Image (spheres, rainbow, N blue to C red):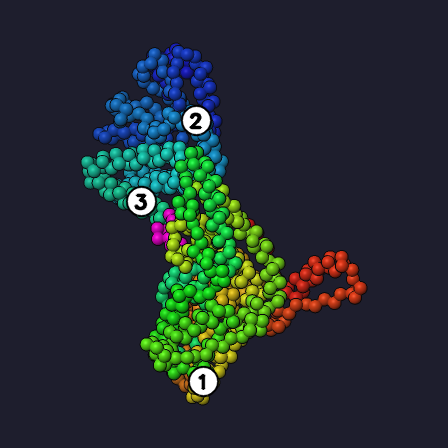
Amino acid sequence: MIQQINSHFEDNTEDHIEVRTPQQNPMDRPKLANQATQLGPKFQFSIEPVIDKVLIHPNSGTKRSRQSPTRRKFMLRCRRGGRRVGSSEAPGGTSECPADWPSDEDHCGVYTSKHCLSGLLNWLSIRTRIHWVWRQNFSGFGGRFQWVGRNFGGFGENFVGLEEDFGGFGGILWVCRKILVGLERILWVWRKILVGLEEFCGFGGRFWWVWREFCGFAGRFWWVWRNLVGMATGGAREKRVMVGYVGLLLVGVLVVGAFWSAGAAPANFDVREHISSSTSYAAGKGIKYGDDEVESTPEGCVPVHINLVARHGTRRPTKKRVKELEDFADRLRVLSAEAAKIQKETTSLPPAWINDWKSPWSDKWIGGELLPKGEEELYDMAQRYKIKYPEIFSEQYHPDVYPIIATQVGRSSASSVAFGMGMFAGQGTLGSGKQRAFSVITDTKGNDIHLRFHDTCMAYKESKKLRKPKVAGWQSQVYELVAKAVQGRYRLALTAHDVTTLWLLCKNEASLLNIVDRACGLFTAEEIELLEWADDLEMHHLKGYGEKLNYRMGVPLLDDVVKSMDRAMAADQSKTLVEKARLRFAHAETIIPFSCLLGLFLEGTDITRVQSEMPLDAPLRPPQKRLWRGALVAPFAANTALVLHKCPADNGAGVKYLVQALHNEKPVMMPACNGTYFCPIETFKEHVVAPHMKRSYESLCRMEVVHEPANQTFFQKFFSIPSHMFRWLFRSAPGQGMCHSGL
């Protein structure tokens, strides 16, 4: 190449020469520069990226020539004497301008759309690295867009010959060719956008690269705009083409806008809907899921019985959590003082509330009791059920007609009382509300296998103890990640344990005090969703679908529900008044397994795995969507109801009974009921209940007793413990313990 340049200057009078070489590798540019320096000090040289070469003349019949945007070349521009008088090109380049064309560079010459930052970026090593990463990492994905663009371009060029053959019809074909050429450019721009997004996400957002691409895109927009202006001043055919271009531009803008809005964070993010099982009932009930259109009640059907299983309402933090928050007040002051020492070195200061924060529950050393807000949740819920099902709740109260059952925990019993007051208000003579007395049935904690099976099933308690450290390890990864992010924003030396307590404070402030701008304000929306997922992960593995024993131990409750339905159907057929509603009040550890037994909140075909006694995979990590959310499954006052309907038989003779499921007062579909909200009682028993009744509660929860030799030393007994635990793990509860990697 050096010999060609020297010989050219010896044989010609030009002071300037332009040499273009195809870009085969990002390192071609430095090699070209090294070769140029061999020309000596009498030459000046510059390297510029050339994307488009466009020869334009508004009045000439000569066809315009266009280089494909994907054919990138480098241009070496040499000057002699500091004056540019002409140009010539190496073999393979475009020829000089026709003699009858103006020499004005606006009409004939090199149109370059990437001059914005080329002068700066040409000499930065980062540009070479970015080009290398671009070609090495996105040659497959971006290349496919390039290939499609070339094919669209080629397909469009094939119409040129058809124009000459078809005469008048060629005008239509000419428009089609223009549309295809326009599609080629849109595809090219899309490839650039996708490559830019991949580069931005993968390498921390290389601002210079994105800005350079933006300048290139702006240059192409200017090229399109200049062509549109020319078409607007042309004839009818040019105007038709202009309309086509405008339409294509509008489509591109709409597609890009949809893509951008899909990746943007939701503008109406409410932290009160993302605090897992600490979510209030109002916030949890407002979360949308499933189909908006719910199947209406079949004609002629009347509700005759209801089974209700509800969690207690909003409560105060438990004694253990109150102590943890009280100690955290001192820890916050220490962190604030440490951050103040580096105040001069940073502009990111901790919020002012940290300095004098005091736990609002510091005077409540017992904790866990039902709050007035929780009482209102259950009272109002009873009022709504009473209005929705007047056929069931129209009778005067009697303990056999409306049995109310609660656990022996204070907040659960208080919730049942609040519900009863709302349900039977106006039936008595007590106070201005005309209240009446009603009974609440409870069982001891150690014997309550219907509502506190999580506390009476010894096999579950031991299994949970073994699985809990593994889940804690998964959660600690999330807490460490969030701790580093908060440290970077506020210079607070938070540990993973500090994040767990700060997240606890956030949940209690948002749910109990309706405060979302203090502890919750330290986290971003993405971090809150990640912390919520960590809570939901624990709920899945220790209480839900993560292990079959978590919900199979609830078979006594499911069996009691079926028996109450059988009694209601028998009483209805015999025209006797017996039980019309069975109302139960318990805990999250009750409502979660009961929802699993019914197959609620499953993804796709997971119901087949549940019925096959297989544990399910962990819930999807944000930002992916998932149904398994504590805020939806088990907020405060969460409730699942099974309503029994009596309907006319299909043949017109006799009656049939259908079961409808409600969760948080909204109709939900049980997956085993063949895609209907109203499940025939026979299908309900066969496909929903029967798969869980293969083993009794006693066989599921019995601990294996291992007889040891009579004369064992202390060390023999101590080292035999792992062996006994291993045998219990794989004999008494087979199938448990599934490794979920990659969390």
Point out the tag, 3 or 2, that comes first from the N-terminus: 2
Residue 32: quarter of image: top left
Residue at position x 57%, y 62% in the image: 547
**Kind of residue indicated by mark 3:** Val
Residue 715: quarter of image: bottom right
Query: How far from the left and from the top, in percent, is residue 304?
Result: 41, 80
Q: Are marks 1 and 2 in contact (CB under 8 Å)?
A: no
Q: Nearer the viewer, mark 3 or mark 1?
A: 1
Q: Is residue 131 above or below residue 175?
A: above
- Which residue, given by chain and number where applicable, does mark 2 sit on? 124
Query: How far from the left and from the top, in percent, is residue 237?
Result: 22, 40
Query: How far from the left and from the top, in percent, is residue 653?
Result: 41, 86
Q: Nearer the viewer, mark 1 or mark 2?
A: 1
Per the model, the C-alpha gap separating discs 3 and 2 is 33 Å
Point out the tag, 3 or 1, that comes first from the N-terminus: 3
- Which residue, given by chain and number where applicable, does mark 3 sit on? 253
Residue stretch in magenta: 264-271
Relative to 9, is 250 on the left or the right? left
Q: Which quarter of the rendered picture does the N terminus lie within?
A: top left
The secondary structure that most of the magenta stretch takes on is: loop
